[in-house]
Image (spheres, grey):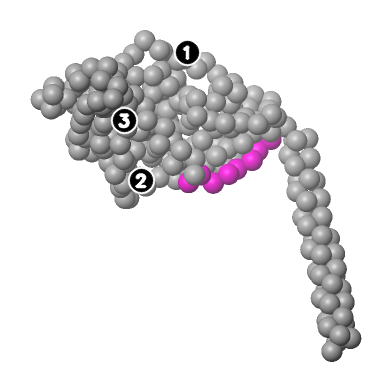
């Protein structure tokens, strides 16, 4: 079984080495992790190996989301750029002064790019592992991610300047364990791997209508003012309650 898994690992590396955002990140620290699944056979499972890589992608992407700084821009700013012929990349590089190596888009945010390729779901790994556009002159890849969550009235993309995971080392250190689950007469497959926290800068770019941005600012101001009012009101009433209780105690004594 172990020899078989080692053979699979040899095929993983060339298939993943072109996915630079996952493969060759600069490592800061690491944690031990694993992925398990109950299967009807004790044979090494290629689909289970692929699902483990998908799980590593999911963990890495959520780490990236947690590390991201938020930037909000208006749709109108894109339309006004370059005399009405705006391009989101011009805004990112020109106005925001950012130089991402990867941009992860949602279904909504990818509409801000022109001539993107369709996602290819015929490859070994999910189609979203592969770029849907590459700009070689500025060292930039555009990718789609199903993990981007948006609310109504906003489009979100993530801008990252370097790799978010280091699969080159994760794969090297992977181990594959299989143990029998007697009560089910099935087998528990587990792949142990190292998950890396990598060195990169990430931004969450939120695109909204200008009217929505103004509405959010007004609501935020109203929330702040309400909290201030409530805090002052609560403070005055708390003091009054304390005063009344103290007076009662004096009268009893």
**Which dot marks residue 197?**
2
Quadrant of the image occupied by residue 214: top right
3 or 2: tag closer to the N-terminus: 3
Using the image, determine if residue 84 lies above or below residue 174.
above
Viewer-proximal residue, 11 or 184? 184
2 or 1: tag closer to the N-terminus: 1
Q: Position of residue 106 (x, y in %)?
A: 54, 26
Judged from this view, the residue extending furthest toward the top is 122
Q: Is residue 243 visible?
A: no
The magenta segment is 67-75
Q: Position of residue 120 (x, y in %)?
A: 41, 13
Which residue is pictured at 85% across the width and 68% down the height? 237
| Cα–Cα gap, marks 1 and 3 | 32 Å
Q: What residue is disc 3 on?
A: 36
1 or 3: tag closer to the N-terminus: 3
Using the image, determine if residue 166 lies above or below residue 189.
below
Are the residues at dot 1 and dot 3 in contact (C-beta closer than 8 Å)? no
In the picture provided, is 2 more to the left or to the right than 228? Answer: left
Q: Secondary structure at mark 2?
A: strand
Q: Secondary structure at mark 3?
A: strand
Which residue is pictured at 56% across the width and 21% down the height? 107
Q: What residue is disc 1 on?
A: 118
Are the residues at dot 3 and dot 2 in contact (C-beta closer than 8 Å)? no
| Cα–Cα gap, marks 3 and 2 | 21 Å
Which residue is pictured at 32% across the width and 43% down the height? 196
Is 69 a magenta residue? yes
Q: Position of residue 73 (x, y in %)?
A: 65, 38
Q: Main secondary structure of the magenta part?
A: strand
In the picture provided, is 160 more to the left or to the right than 52? Answer: right
- Tell me if mark 3 has few (under 14), some (14-19) or many (20+) residues whose alpha carbon lies within 10 angstroms of its own: some
């Amino acid at each position: 079984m172990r020899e078989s898994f080692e053979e699979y690992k040899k095929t993983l590396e060339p298939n993943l080495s072109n996915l630079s955002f996952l493969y060759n990140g600069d490592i800061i620290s690491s944690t031990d992790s694993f992925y398990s699944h109950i299967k009807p056979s004790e044979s090494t499972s290629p689909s289970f190996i692929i699902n483990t890589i998908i799980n590593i992608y999911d963990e890495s992407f959520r780490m990236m989301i947690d590390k991201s700084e938020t930037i909000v821009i208006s749709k109108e700013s894109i339309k006004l750029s370059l005399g009405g012929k705006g391009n989101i990349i011009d805004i990112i590089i020109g106005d925001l002064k950012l130089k991402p190596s990867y941009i992860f888009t949602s279904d909504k945010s990818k509409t801000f790019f022109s001539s993107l390729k369709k996602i290819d779901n015929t490859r070994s790994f999910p189609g979203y592992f592969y770029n849907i556009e590459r700009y070689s002159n500025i060292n930039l890849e555009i990718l789609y991610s199903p993990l981007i969550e948006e609310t109504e009235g906003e489009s979100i993309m993530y801008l990252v300047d370097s790799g978010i995971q280091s699969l080159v080392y994760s794969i090297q250190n992977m181990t594959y364990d299989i143990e029998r689950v007697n009560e089910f007469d099935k087998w528990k497959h587990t792949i142990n791997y190292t998950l890396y926290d990598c060195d990169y800068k990430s931004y969450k770019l939120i695109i909204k209508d200008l009217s929505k941005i103004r509405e959010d600012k007004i609501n935020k101001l109203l929330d702040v003012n309400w909290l201030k009012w409530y805090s002052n009101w609560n403070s005055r009433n708390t003091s009054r309650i304390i005063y009344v209780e103290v007076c009662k105690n004096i009268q009893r004594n």
